[in-house]
Image: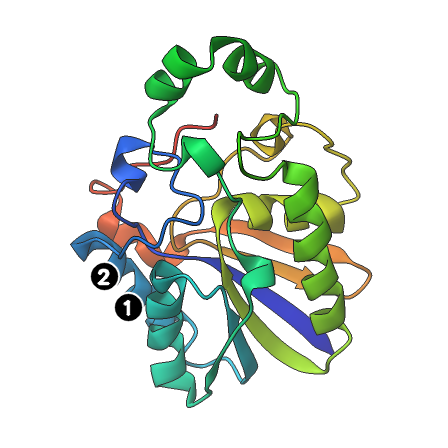
Amino acid sequence: MARLVLVRHGQAKGNDEHRFIGQTDVPLTDLGRRQAEAVGHRLRTVDISRIVSSDLVRATDTAAEIAAVSGRIIETDPAVREIHNGEWAGLTPQEIAEGWPDMWNRYRGGEDVPRPGGERWADVRQRMLGAVEGLLADDGVTVVVSHGGPIIITAHWAAAQTVEGNVFRGPFGAVQNAALTVIDPGPKLTAFNDVGHLAAFADLEVPDAPV
């Protein structure tokens, strides 16, 4: 039977400041590397068939810890990247609100606004679900190392939840760094935002603000 284990990358530079990183290729922080190691340890007994990762370094470095315990190679796929933030890339919510007040208010109100020079969540949904549906057609356990937005979108889809606007305004909220989300054929959401392997870092984790 097919099963997808979606893993959000470990904490990356800028996550702790709630910056809109998107497709900016920033590295893991020290905490992020430790979280990635914890994910690898958590999945060490799982019979993994494939590892598919976003090609951004914070994802591939997280995937490397899973590859180390499973012996599988890492396949990269830009379809599972985070949203392209365009001119918002690297900015804090306050900076975006100051530069694009009307657009920011619409985004905060739940609208799926197009980032200037970037994508909408609808664009991410199309490419992410295209990749996920193909992977669910395979047998075995596929680990997909991705990002917060695409994973939330996939969880909504698997739970038959329709969220057409700002995905962070949906029923599930944000996904923590290095959390696990499990999708079975159907699709069926089997687990969401599982962070049991991160208990040792509970006092150090800075959760993303749901924006």
Q: Position of residue 20 (x, y in %)?
A: 40, 35
Q: At label 1, which amino acid type do we have?
A: Glu
Dot 2, crowdedness within 10 Å: few (<14), some or many (≥20)?
some
For mark 2, what is the residue? 34
Q: How is the image coloured?
A: rainbow
The answer to whether 185 appears left or right of 7 in the picture is right
Residue that appears at 47% across and 28% down: 210
Assign a secondary structure to mark 2.
Answer: helix
Residue that appears at 35% across and 66% down: 62
The one nearer the camera, 58 or 87, is 87
Note whether 41 is above or below 49 in the view shown.
above
Picture quarter containing residue 198? bottom left
Assign a secondary structure to mark 1.
Answer: helix
Picture quarter containing residue 28? bottom left
The answer to whether 75 appears left or right of 25 in the picture is right
Residue 101: assigned label: none
Note whether 184 is above or below 109 in the view shown.
below
Residue that appears at 55% across and 31% down: 115
The one nearer the camera, 180 or 199, is 180
Q: Position of residue 16 (x, y in %)?
A: 26, 37
The one nearer the camera, 154 or 182, is 154
Residue 37: assigned label: 1
Could you tell me if the residues under marks 1 and 2 are in contact, i.e. CB atoms within 8 Å? yes
Dot 1, crowdedness within 10 Å: few (<14), some or many (≥20)?
many
Q: Position of residue 84 (x, y in %)?
A: 51, 44
The answer to whether 210 appears left or right of 12 in the picture is right
